[in-house]
Amino acid sequence: MRRLLLLTFVLLVSVPTIIAQKFIVNPWGDDQVECYEVRKSEKGWDILYDSKTKKAFDAGYAFYQVDSLKNGDGYVFEDGGKYYVIYAHDLKFADDNPSYMTNPLSEKTQARATMLGKFYSSMYPAYIVLLSILVAVGLSYLYMKGKYSLRKVVLIAIPAAIFVMSAVLIVGYMNFETKIFWWCDYDRYGFWSSLFRFFPFAAVVAAQVYSIKLYETVLLSDNPYVSDGLSIKPVAISVALCLPVAIITAIIAALMDIKGSLLSIITTIVFFVTLAIGLIKSCRKNMETLGKINGIFFTIFSVVYIIGCLISLWALITLVFQLIFQILVVIFAIIMIYVLANTKTRRRRSDGTYEDY
């Protein structure tokens, strides 16, 4: 009987240790995260949305999960006798958890804790893109000012710079989408700070878009017989349309009751055919201008450049719409205050006449 009671006691004591999962604070693009205090009620955990109840926890802070919010995304933990909530996207599953425990975090959240995630949650990608643009623009400027001896260097440096910044953007977007632009995030920094960051961001995007024109100018500088430049527009149109056309095709095919592998095959064919139309058209023109090998290389290279530009433009447009919406809200509020301030009310005097006030 004593052994049975002792075994029961040991099991009861060890249950919290067995089921409690350990997490580490891993904020994206910051070195700490602010957490609200929570309190237990009959309905669950109530979040105390008050600046006085917030507490900042540094990256690397470890804790054991006590409970979770009803939606499952908020993790409740204890610190200093109080309970706080932190959300999954700011967490990393601790490596020293028992092997039988399953990581509850999504694959996207887990990716943030990888070396690639740490890279894109820092300012290094932005610095690399900025440095690449400065190199391309700087060397092009020197060449245009008469430093013609730099032509070979410029012809290598500009496409290398364009490729590097395009590759950084494409890899980042494929893994973390627009989160790679966290340093210009409206939800994080608010209106004024985002507006301040918008202008250098727009300048960088403009330089990125124009960089291919600099390369074209230097590339064709020793060929005065070329008047209409290289062909990029057909490729750009195909890159922009291949995905929407494939989606529309998939919808039409689904309405025609085409399913399974046949639907995938048709959609894939339409995608690559749409892309190939622009590629072939531009490639023919570029081969006539640059020769067969150089023309093919430039056309393929332009695809990488265009995708990188589209990612940057998409992030910039998203930020613009967020800022415009807030500006419209402020303008509307000012108009309403002005209208209310100038609205006159009529009051009846004792003699039966009316006056405005």
Image (cartoon, rainbow, N blue to C red):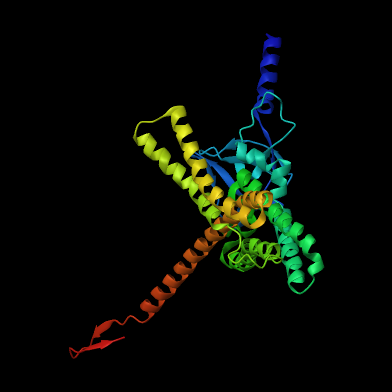
Residue 171 drawn at (x, y percent) = 65, 46
Q: Is residue 171 left or right of residue 71?
A: right
Residue at the top extreme of this rendering: 1
Nearest the viewer among 201 and 206 is 206
Nearest the viewer among 182 and 61 is 182
Residue 98 drawn at (x, y percent) = 71, 26
Q: Is residue 49 left or right of residue 161?
A: left
Please state, as top left, top right, bottom left or bottom right, where the N terminus lies in the image.
top right
Q: Quadrant of the rendered structure where residue 313 is?
A: bottom right
Q: Is residue 54 visible?
A: no
Q: Residue at x 53, y 54 (%)?
A: 234
Residue 136 drawn at (x, y percent) = 73, 63
Please state, as top left, top right, bottom left or bottom right, where the C terminus lies in the image.
bottom left
Nearest the viewer among 191 and 125 is 125
Q: Is residue 330 visible?
A: yes
Q: Quadrant of the rendered structure where residue 16 is?
A: top right
Q: Is residue 240 left or right of residue 118?
A: left
Residue at the bottom extreme of this rendering: 351
Residue 306 drawn at (x, y percent) = 59, 54
